[in-house]
Every structure is written in C-alpha cells, then in structure tokens.
Image (cartoon, helix red, strand yellow):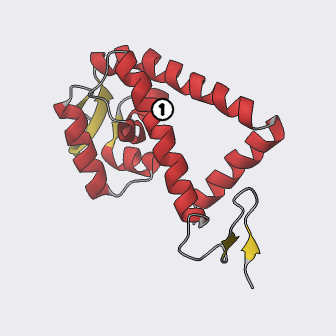
Amino acid sequence: MSELSPGLGRASRTTGAATRENLGFLLAKASQRWNELLYDRFVAGGYADVRPSYGSILVPLFEEDGLRMGELAARARLSKQTMTTMVRLLERDGLVERRGDPSDGRASLVFLSERARDFRPVAEAALAELDRLVVRKLSARGRTRLRETLRSLADL
C-alpha cells in the first residue's frame, strides 16, 4: 500500500522509489533552483560568466586566500582531478591565479584575482538575498535543522 504525499493529492511510493518525492531528486532540484537564483543575481551584478558551481572554489578562498590545491580540494570537498579542472576554468575566466608555493616547489597555491575580489560583494549580496528568502520560508529552528541535516548528508 502506498502513502499519500502531503499536498500532492496522489499516491507516492516509498521515499527510495524513483519518483519526484525521492530525497535525492528533491535535493538536486532544490540545488538546481538555488543555482538558478544565484546566477540571475550574478548576471544582474554584471558577472554573467561566473557560474554558481565556481562557488566550490571561491567560497573557501573568500574564507582564506592562497590555499594549496590539496587543501582547497579538501575544503571544497572535490577530488583533486575535479579541483584541477575547476581551477583551470576559474583561471580562464580571470577569477583565480596559481602561483608556486615558496615553501614547496612541487605545490601550487591558489589566489583570488582582483576580479574575484571585485565579485565578492556581488556574491555576498546574492547569498544574503537568498538567505532572506529562506528566512521567509523556514523558522529559525527549521533553518538550524536544515543546515545540520545538509552537513550530515554531505558526509554520507
């Protein structure tokens, strides 16, 4: 017997089923919508070439500039191979620069470019605006629980 999905008026199978009620599907769609909203704000701020996915690299560098590739990969939760690809894209778009690590000739450090530093207020304003939208949808307790849940899911 199937459960009735609240607000849908149709029967839904179990959470793990391949339906639009599947947790993975819902997470992916929420992430997709978040990125669409971010991108709209980046375009409005004059940065149409900055992809929301660049946040995986930019946010850790906004927190601490000049990270080694391996440390940046760990903070971004990306494989080293993906990190290398992403850093190349951000270099191409003038957002980061790679420099040799003076303490280890084999390592590279990744730094924000001047353009990325100019972009930071646009990104922060976009994120603040999206946070305000979330505040309208969820209580303080709901936001705390969501943040904790997302951190937990990122550790699966």
> Residue at coordinates 46% horizontally, 46% vertically from top-left?
32
Can residue 53 be seen at all in this image of the molecule?
yes
> Residue at coordinates 63% horizontally, 52% vertically from top-left?
150
Q: Position of residue 102 (x, y in %)?
A: 25, 34
Q: Position of residue 105 (x, y in %)?
A: 19, 42
> Residue at coordinates 28% horizontally, 21% vertically from top-left?
113
Q: What amino acid is at disc 1?
A: Leu
In the foreground, 85 or 11: 11
Q: Is mark 1 on a helix, strand or loop?
A: helix
Badge 1 is on which residue? 37
Q: Position of residue 139 (x, y in %)?
A: 81, 36
> Residue at coordinates 27% horizontally, 44% vertically from top-left?
86
Kindly indicate the quadrant of the structure image that contains residue 67.
top left
In the foreground, 117 or 22: 22
Q: Position of residue 4 (x, y in %)?
A: 75, 70
In the image: residue 90, left or right of residue 24: left
Kindly indicate the quadrant of the structure image that contains residue 5.
bottom right
